[in-house]
Amino acid sequence: MAELETTLTDAASGAAPAPALTAREKRDLQKNQLRPLANRRPELYDEDEYSSDEYEAMLDMYNGTLASIEEGEIVKSKVLEIRENMVVLDIGFKSEGTIPLEEFKDMPDLKPGDEVEVLLEHLEDAEGSVVLSKKKADFMRVWERIRLAYENDQPVTGTLIKKIKGGVVVDLMGVDAFLPGSQIALRRVPNIDELLGQTYDFKIIKLNKRRRNIVVSRRVILEQERAGKREKLMKELEKDQIRKGVVKNITDFGAFIDLGGVDGLLHITDMSWGRISHPSEMVQIGQELEIKVLDIDWDRERISLGLKQLQAYPWKDVAAKYPVGTRVQGKVVSITNYGAFIELEPGIEGLVHISEMSWTRNVRHPSKLVSIGETIEAVVLKVDPDEEKISLGMKQTETDPWTVLPLKYPVGTRITGKVRNLTSFGAFVEIEPGIDGLIHISDMSWTKRVQHPSEVVKKGDTVDVVILNIDSENKRISLGLKQAEEDPWLRIGETFPVGTELRGHVVRLMDKGVVVEIGNDIEGFVPLSQLNITGKIVSNPADVAFEGMNLDLRVLEVDPIHRRIVLAVTNIPEEQPPRPAEPPTVHSSEGEL
């Protein structure tokens, strides 16, 4: 029987198709094909036992079997044997086929006798074997499902497996597809790596079988879902409604809350009545919250939400809780150039202005006295519930030292202090820590007209001074440097009687004369009329004198009451310092004489 099958198969596999035959010719051909078998196996063939119809039926049976198998088709096969690295399969053809065992990874329980679908790539290879592929058969089955899903606009399930440039590779039933980054979600995903391994539904938006190119989108499905949920939410969502939502995303300015398909914004200022520096202090991603709907704008697709609005308003009875004069404790939560904000309780903050931090210190910046997180004591100075403002004072927790200074330092008290700073009009001397007094430039010398404090004192000098006045209200102390010494004008008239001859040098040129120093910081004045030693009228002292010039002088007048000595030039010595190259400055005599 096997030989008969071989003969029929050889006849059926002829290279060139035979021309159309008559019924008789066809029957004769069948007889000729079967006759060699009959000669070898007479028990199987007896020409007298078979009619032409029987021959034809038998031949059609074998030919039909062969005709049902074509290259490029998926066929059913039976597992005959499982070897070390391959599987032997029977597809009902004249020879068996083999497939590498690794193509059956998805069938760990494979055993002989099982039926599997494979792709018939070739009926015969160079060695006459059937070429089969399970992997390609699986791919064709999957691709067909993908094609139908694409044509029918149906979703497919896939798993994100690998991040690549521009997006993610998605496993669709064993076939790789590309998910662009813009199609992953409705908003940009900050960390795609967190999504790897997740399974979602996708829509196929591009398909190219020849290139095996599949592009999918999750965003399309999310947009469709959002549109349906948005429509439902539009009907039920109302302002001032209290709803539950899940924290979807956190930014520096707030958190996005999923209300069931539509996101709302919970701004950082609506999270707490108190001060928070970042939304993560109040909420976490995935946390379920009960929130209040503050505003709805469907045209701009904006929903504003509030969390603090579900809590009691802390400023309601603040004036009764913190009356003026109350001493309170609080934590420093913010520092600015003009002061520090103190949290008295969650949602209630007061400001300590820089001017209210110390009675005595000149505070240049609040950070010099307080730091973030520090707990301080303060006194309530003012409460404004409407503006949600409380003014606090730190210095008010201590006794104002300026109220006791007049008693502690009566006028005329002689004290020692350190020069802390110089200005154009005087020098500030520290009386005690944080309290300075001013030596005005006019109170620095009895005899010398001081142009700048640096002519008399330097920063850091320790000096003896006398209290001239204390103004507690304006926090000012006037000090005298010259008053710490005896007034020399009481005896200058005896030291420099009229007619005394002496030598001095020019220290300033004035429009009405020159000021000269005659020793011991004593200055005298030479009028223009006493400069004309040559007999010529002098209208400008710069014509005959310069600063530093030596002059022989005679005392004309001594006035202790007005603290003035008038001198006359008697001679100009030959020995003189170099004359300055630049023209001398002539000062106004107003207030000099």
Image: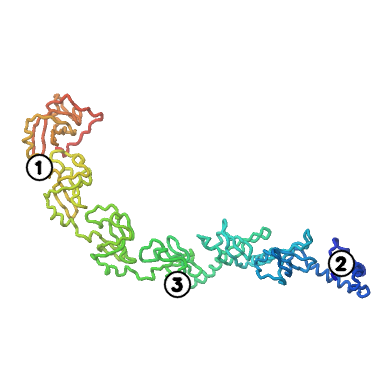
Mark 2 or mark 3, which is nearer the start of the sequence? 2
Alpha-carbon span between mark 1 and mark 2: 151 Å
Image coloring type: rainbow
Q: Which residue is mark 1?
A: 486
Disc number placed over residue 243 in the picture, else none: 3
Q: Mark 1: few, some, or many residues within 10 Å (few <14, many ≥20)?
A: few
Q: Mark 3: few, some, or many residues within 10 Å (few <14, many ≥20)?
A: some
User: Splitting the image into 4 quarters, where does residue 295 fall?
Assistant: bottom left
Q: Which residue is mark 2?
A: 7
Alpha-carbon span between mark 1 and mark 3: 87 Å
Q: Nearer the viewer, residue 567 or 361?
A: 361
Asked if residue 63 lies left or right of residue 149, the reply is right
Q: Amino acid at mark 1?
A: Glu
The answer to the question of whether label 1 and label 2 lie on touching residues, with beta carbons closer than 8 A, is no
Instruction: Give the image location of residue 1, x and y in percent.
Output: 85, 71
Asked if residue 202 lies left or right of residue 423, the reply is right
Instruction: Give the image location of residue 375, x and y in percent.
Output: 29, 62
